[in-house]
């Protein structure tokens, strides 16, 4: 009896080809989706970094003026004399009533560091006894004196009060502002500095 040869092989080949084709299409689609996902992530990161805010620059808070007797000394932005309180070369904290007579110099709001006029160096900020930021020169906080009314006054120089001695802060920098005149009168009258005895100054 003659056997009939099997003819199912071509059908099997067709089925396998279709199956492999489907797998290749699915693989290609997965790679394309993954590539799009990576591209989106990178674009977002770049956009986020471009919106970072710039650091704010500080305003000038310390200037230089020339006193006829003391030479070049530091002043605030209004030309008022700046002082330090020390004893034997060391800083003496100014607290309580001291702050009423000797207002401290503080940085401009929103600034990261105090800025001085050209030639002024050694400016930093230090923490006051109550945690307030104070402008300092070479580590010593700077203060004004309530008796000084204009740029010509240096009434606080040499006063011994509040546990130390007050001195102007001298500098080698050149003057940046002319002293303010207290009147238009050409006549000169020497006014004695206020006494430090019994008034808490």
Image (tube, rainbow, N blue to C red):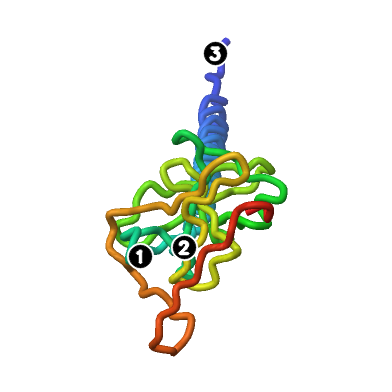
Q: How many marks?
A: 3
Q: Where is residue 88 shown, x and y percent of the image?
A: 46, 33
Q: Mark 2 or mark 3, which is nearer the start of the sequence? A: 3
As helix, strand or loop, the secondary structure at mark 3 comes to loop
Q: Where is residue 196 shown, x and y percent of the image?
A: 60, 54
> Does residue 32 lie above or below 2 as drawn?
below
As helix, strand or loop, the secondary structure at mark 1 comes to strand
Q: Mark 1 or mark 3, which is nearer the start of the sequence? A: 3
Q: Which mark is residue 192?
A: none
Residue receiving disc 2:
154
Q: Which mark is residue 2?
A: 3
> Does residue 84 lie above or below 68 as drawn?
above
Quarter in which the C terminus is drawn: bottom right
Distance from disc 1 to disc 2, alpha carbons, whole Å, reads 9 Å
Mark 3 burial class by Cα count in 10 Å: few <14, some 14-19, many 20+ = few
Residue receiving disc 1:
67
Q: Residue at x 48, y 57 (%)?
A: 82
């Amino acid at each position: 009896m003659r056997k009939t040869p099997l003819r199912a092989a071509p059908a099997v080949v067709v089925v396998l080809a279709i199956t492999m084709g489907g797998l290749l299409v699915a693989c290609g689609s997965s790679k394309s989706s993954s590539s799009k996902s990576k591209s989106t992530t990178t674009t977002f990161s770049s956009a986020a970094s471009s919106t970072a805010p710039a650091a704010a620059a500080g305003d000038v808070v310390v200037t230089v003026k020339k006193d006829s007797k003391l030479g070049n000394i530091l002043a605030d932005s209004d030309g008022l004399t700046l002082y330090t309180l020390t004893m034997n070369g060391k800083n003496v904290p100014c607290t309580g009533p001291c702050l009423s007579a000797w207002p401290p110099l503080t940085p401009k709001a929103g600034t990261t560091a105090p800025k001085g006029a050209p030639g002024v160096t050694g400016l930093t900020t230090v923490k006051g006894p109550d945690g307030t930021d104070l402008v300092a020169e070479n580590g010593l906080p700077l203060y004004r004196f309530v008796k000084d009314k204009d740029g010509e006054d240096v009434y606080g120089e040499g006063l011994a009060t509040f546990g130390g001695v007050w001195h102007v802060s001298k500098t080698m920098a050149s003057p940046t502002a002319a002293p303010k005149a207290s009147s238009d009168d050409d006549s000169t009258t020497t006014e004695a500095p206020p006494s430090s005895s019994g008034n808490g100054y």
